[in-house]
C-alpha cells in the first residue's frame, strides 16, 4: 500500500533563504508523525508545501501514490488534506456550528443534509458539542484550538496537519487537548503534528522527525530521536559532548 503522503526531495527558497532543502519522508495510514525544530527551521513552510499554499522549486508531493504537486490547495482539501493554524482565526461572529458547517460544505463539498449530522459528530468528538450555538468569538483559547480541530475534521481528511496547536495553553488545557487528539487517532486519520511542547507531542506520535534550515536531520523513534546528539546540539542548543 502506498503511503498516505510522501515528500520527495522537496525544496523551496526565497532568494537566499531556504525553507525546504531536499526534504523527503513518508507517512503511513493511521500513523502519527511529530515534527520539531528551531524557530525558522521551515516546519510551517513544509505544511504550506503539503497543502498547496506554496509551490516547490523542486521535488514532489504524493498523496496515496498520486502526484499532487501542482494541484491547488482547494483540490487537495477535497482529496483529504486538512490543517490547523498556529493562530486560530474562526469566523468570530458566527456560531461554532456555523464555523464547522462552512468547512464541511465548502472544504469537503458535503450536501447540507449530510453535513449537519457530520458537523455535530465532529463537535462531539472535539468536546465542543455544548458550545455549538455559542458565537466563536466568545470561546476561550482552548475552545478556539478545539474549533480549529473540528473545522479541519469537517473537511473529512485522510491526513490532518496540526501546526503548534498546543501553543499558549496551560498544562491542564494541554493535557485535555492531547486526550482529544488521541481520540481523533482512533478514527484512523493520519496526523503530522508540529509542536514545541515536546512532552505533549511524545504522548501522541509514533515517529519523530527533526528539521533544521529546511533539512531533515533525524527521523525515527521519538525517545531515541530526542536523545540523539544532533537533536541535542541543534534543536536544544547544547553541546552534546559537554
Image: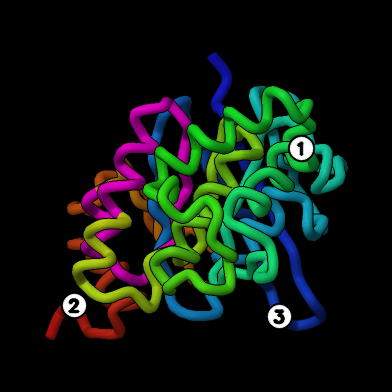
Query: Which is nearer the N-term, disc 3 or disc 2?
Result: 3
Instruction: Read off the residue under disc 3.
Output: 17
Quadrant in the rendering for residue 79 = top right
Using the image, tell me which numbered label, if any, was put on residue 105: 1
Query: Is residue 210 left or right of 240 when viewed as pictured?
Result: right
Q: Dividing the image into 4 quarters, which one contains the C terminus?
A: bottom left
Q: Secondary structure at mark 1?
A: helix
Q: Where is residue 74 drawn, in percent x and y?
A: 82, 44
Distance from disc 2 to disc 1, alpha carbons, whole Å, reads 51 Å
Query: Which is nearer the N-term, disc 2 or disc 1?
Result: 1
Characterize the local packing of mark 2: few (<14), some (14-19) or many (20 or more) Cα atoms within 10 angstroms.
some
Q: Residue at x 22, y 84 (%)?
A: 239
Span of residues in magenta: 178-203
Q: Nearer the viewer, mark 3 or mark 2?
A: 3
Q: Residue at x 52, y 73 (%)?
A: 138
The residue at the far front in this view is: 133
Task: Say which of 97 and 75 sits in front.
Answer: 97
Using the image, tell me which numbered label, if any, was put on residue 240: 2
Distance from disc 3 to disc 2, alpha carbons, whole Å, reads 28 Å
Vertical relation: 33 (above or below) 90: above
Task: Say which of 237 and 148 sits in front.
Answer: 148
Amino acid at each position: 500500500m502506498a503511503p498516505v503522503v510522501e515528500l520527495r526531495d522537496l525544496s523551496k527558497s526565497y532568494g537566499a533563504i531556504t525553507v525546504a532543502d531536499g526534504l523527503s519522508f513518508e507517512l503511513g495510514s493511521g500513523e502519527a508523525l511529530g515534527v520539531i525544530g528551531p524557530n525558522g527551521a521551515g516546519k510551517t513552510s513544509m505544511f504550506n508545501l503539503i497543502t498547496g499554499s506554496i509551490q516547490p522549486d523542486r521535488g514532489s508531493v504524493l498523496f496515496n501514490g498520486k502526484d499532487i504537486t501542482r494541484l491547488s490547495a482547494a483540490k487537495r482539501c477535497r482529496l483529504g488534506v486538512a490543517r490547523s493554524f498556529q493562530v486560530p482565526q474562526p469566523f468570530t461572529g458566527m456560531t461554532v456550528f456555523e464555523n464547522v458547517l462552512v468547512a464541511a460544505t465548502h472544504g469537503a463539498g458535503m450536501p447540507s443534509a449530510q453535513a449537519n449530522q457530520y458537523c455535530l459528530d465532529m463537535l462531539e468528538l472535539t468536546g465542543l458539542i455544548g458550545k455549538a450555538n455559542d458565537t466563536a468569538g466568545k470561546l476561550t483559547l482552548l475552545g478556539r484550538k478545539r474549533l480549529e480541530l473540528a473545522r479541519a475534521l469537517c473537511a473529512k481528511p485522510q491526513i490532518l496537519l496540526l501546526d503548534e496547536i498546543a501553543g499558549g495553553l496551560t498544562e491542564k488545557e494541554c493535557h485535555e487537548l492531547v486526550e482529544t487528539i488521541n481520540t481523533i487517532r482512533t478514527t484512523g486519520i493520519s496526523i503530522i503534528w508540529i509542536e514545541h511542547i515536546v512532552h505533549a507531542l511524545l504522548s501522541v506520535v509514533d515517529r519523530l522527525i527533526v528539521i533544521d534550515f529546511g533539512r531533515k536531520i533525524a527521523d525515527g523513534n521519538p525517545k531515541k530521536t530526542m536523545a540523539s546528539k544532533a537533536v541535542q546540539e541543534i534543536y536544544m542548543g547544547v553541546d552534546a559532548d559537554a
